[in-house]
């Protein structure tokens, strides 16, 4: 399957099977905004829960919070987002279409031979690092990069555009009431640093985790749920003693990669990408990239954010944000290592990895299936319970099993259609186990269990079904 097709097929599959829909689809959609359907919402929640537990349950020294989306407007001045959260953009004068400069050049690089592409991207990286906008425009013109809509190279100068959405709070629409929709969840953690540290008697090093919506007015938003205007982040800020940030940075790179591998995704589908151009707050940063159908792209960032944010909030709020370290008898503003993963990108990563089209044809007949080989711990439905017939007491036995299991994990009960059709529908939504209740169940209390990935079947005691599923979905 060509990779372009794979992405299109995944998008179509997500719609057909209730994972992801375009927002407001009946009104022709809203660009780069998506809704999660019945199975997508379960998958997303399971990934969020898995991340949350890996942070707050599996570490003694990490706690979770849930800060509001709206924050005092000065937060975004202090964080640097008002002045710096912008991307260099360029407009095509003929089509009036606006492009992020790096995306425009990257898209062109994909059409070049490997060596030429690398040289172009290297040049782009150094111009971006120097904020050399004239140089970037010249690079676009020298490479004869054209607008995909007008087909011309009639470009404006490169300019910076802020990516934050704003709205007004209260009834008077003046500047004082302007509030932003948060572009990252991290700042809700920084402004609560002392509240959590004091109320939780936290000792450095410690972390604060949070998941929640973030909003960015992305100019070029594409790639399905890869780049959205409304999305969800899962972020953790780890507060450390100044001078120890390098070792904690390495620790979190390693720990986060282990989390990714624990999703059953092979190591060679990931790579680290060190940042050349560091954000205004960082002294080291890297991306964890996954090999999406459109190539290796960032799914998570690990950033050594120094003491930039706490110091800035200290300055703008006039409140002390220091910590007294009893081990060394010193007050200081802690340094921070941040891990920041996009939940929607994680969903897209898991779906890309799981999606498979399999040819099951034999000499006798043509056959195929589409299956989502999702890790059981994040699959929307863990167990499908399928009575072979709608009569002879089989539904009653099946419903008894359903009642036994449903308080522990999400089950699906279905009586309709042939068993083969029911299996295929469960394959398509990624259910790892199906059990069929038949006449033999009445005699010897066994059921047929069918394994999604291998399609093999075996008979097991009905009494052992719950335990088998529990073992497979155990997260840690
Ligand atoms: N607090 C740091 C921060 O926000 P970032 O690299 O801008 O860093 C972190 O974003 C993660 O959020 C990214 O790795 C990506 O997974 C996700 N993300 C960022 N912008 C996104 C967008 N427009 N749509 C979907 N996910 C996005």
Image (cartoon, rainbow, N blue to C red):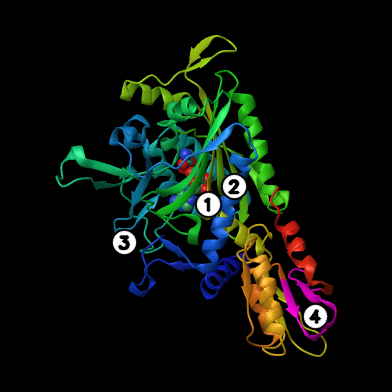
Disc 2 designates what residue?
51
State how far apart marks 2 and 3 are (Cα).
Answer: 43 Å
Q: Disc 1 beta carbon < 8 A from ligand 1?
A: yes
Taking the spot 57% from the left edge, 34% from the top edge, the residue there is: 62
Taking the spot 63% from the left edge, 58% from the top edge, the residue there is: 378
- In the image, residue 99 sits, relative to residue 439, either above or below, namely above
Residue 465 x, y percent position in the rendering: 76, 67
As helix, strand or loop, the secondary structure at mark 4 comes to helix
Q: Which residues are magenta?
A: 434-456
As helix, strand or loop, the secondary structure at mark 2 comes to helix
- In the image, residue 102 sits, relative to residue 60, either above or below, namely below
On the picture, is 174 further left or further right than 373? left
On the picture, is 260 further left or further right than 310? right
Of mark 1 and mark 4, the one earlier in the sequence is 1
Q: Are marks 1 and 2 in contact (CB under 8 Å)?
A: yes
State how far apart marks 4 and 3 are (Cα).
Answer: 67 Å
Disc 1 designates what residue?
343
State how far apart marks 1 and 4 are (Cα).
Answer: 42 Å
Q: Residues within 10 Å of mark 1 (few under 14, many from 20)?
A: many
Quadrant containing the N terminus is bottom right
298 magenta-colored:
no
- Residue 441 tag number: 4
Near-viewer residue (303 or 156): 303
């Amino acid at each position: 399957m060509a990779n372009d097709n794979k992405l299109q097929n995944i998008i179509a599959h997500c719609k057909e099977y209730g994972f992801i829909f375009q927002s407001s689809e009946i009104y022709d959609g809203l660009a780069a905004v998506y809704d999660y359907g019945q199975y997508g919402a379960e998958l997303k929640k399971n990934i969020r829960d898995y991340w949350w537990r890996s942070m707050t349950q599996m570490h003694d020294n990490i706690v979770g919070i849930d800060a509001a989306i709206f924050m005092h407007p000065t937060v975004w001045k202090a964080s640097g987002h008002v002045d710096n959260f912008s991307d260099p953009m360029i407009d095509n004068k003929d089509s009036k279409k606006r492009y992020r400069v790096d995306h425009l050049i990257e898209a062109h690089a994909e059409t070049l031979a490997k060596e030429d592409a690398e040289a172009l991207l290297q040049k782009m990286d150094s111009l971006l690092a120097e904020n050399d906008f004239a140089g970037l425009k010249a690079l676009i013109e020298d490479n004869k990069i054209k607008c995909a809509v007008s087909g011309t190279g009639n470009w404006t100068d490169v300019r910076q555009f802020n990516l934050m959405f704003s709205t007004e709070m209260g009834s008077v629409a003046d500047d004082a009431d302007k509030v932003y929709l948060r572009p990252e969840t991290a700042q809700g953690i920084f402004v609560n640093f002392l509240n959590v540290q004091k109320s939780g008697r936290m000792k450095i090093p410690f972390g604060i985790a949070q998941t929640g919506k973030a909003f960015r007015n992305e100019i070029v938003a594409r790639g399905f749920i890869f780049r959205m205007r409304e999305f969800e982040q899962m972020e953790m800020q780890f507060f450390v003693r100044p001078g120890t940030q390098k070792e904690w940075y390495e620790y979190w790179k390693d720990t986060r990669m282990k989390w990714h591998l624990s999703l059953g995704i092979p190591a060679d589908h990931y790579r680290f990408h060190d940042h050349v151009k560091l954000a205004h707050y960082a002294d080291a940063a890297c991306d964890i990239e996954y090999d999406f159908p459109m190539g290796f792209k960032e799914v998570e960032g690990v950033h050594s954010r120094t003491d930039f944010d706490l110091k800035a909030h200290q300055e703008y709020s006039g409140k002390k944000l220091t910590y007294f370290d009893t081990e060394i008898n010193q007050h200081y503003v802690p340094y921070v290592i941040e891990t920041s993963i996009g939940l929607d990108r994680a969903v897209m990563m898991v779906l890309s990895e799981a999606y498979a089209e399999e040819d099951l044809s034999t000499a006798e007949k043509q056959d195929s299936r589409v299956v989502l080989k999702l890790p059981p711990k994040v699959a929307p439905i863990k167990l499908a319970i399928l009575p072979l017939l709608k009569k002879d007491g089989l539904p009653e036995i099946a419903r008894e099993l359903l009642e036994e299991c449903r308080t522990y994990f999400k089950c699906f009960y279905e009586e309709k259609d042939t068993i083969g059709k029911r299996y295929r529908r469960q394959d398509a939504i990624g259910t790892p186990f199906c059990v069929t209740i038949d006449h033999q169940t009445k005699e010897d209390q066994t059921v047929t269990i069918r394994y999604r990935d291998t399609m093999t079947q075996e008979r097991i005691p009905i009494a052992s079904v719950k335990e088998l599923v529990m073992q497979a979905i155990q997260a840690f």
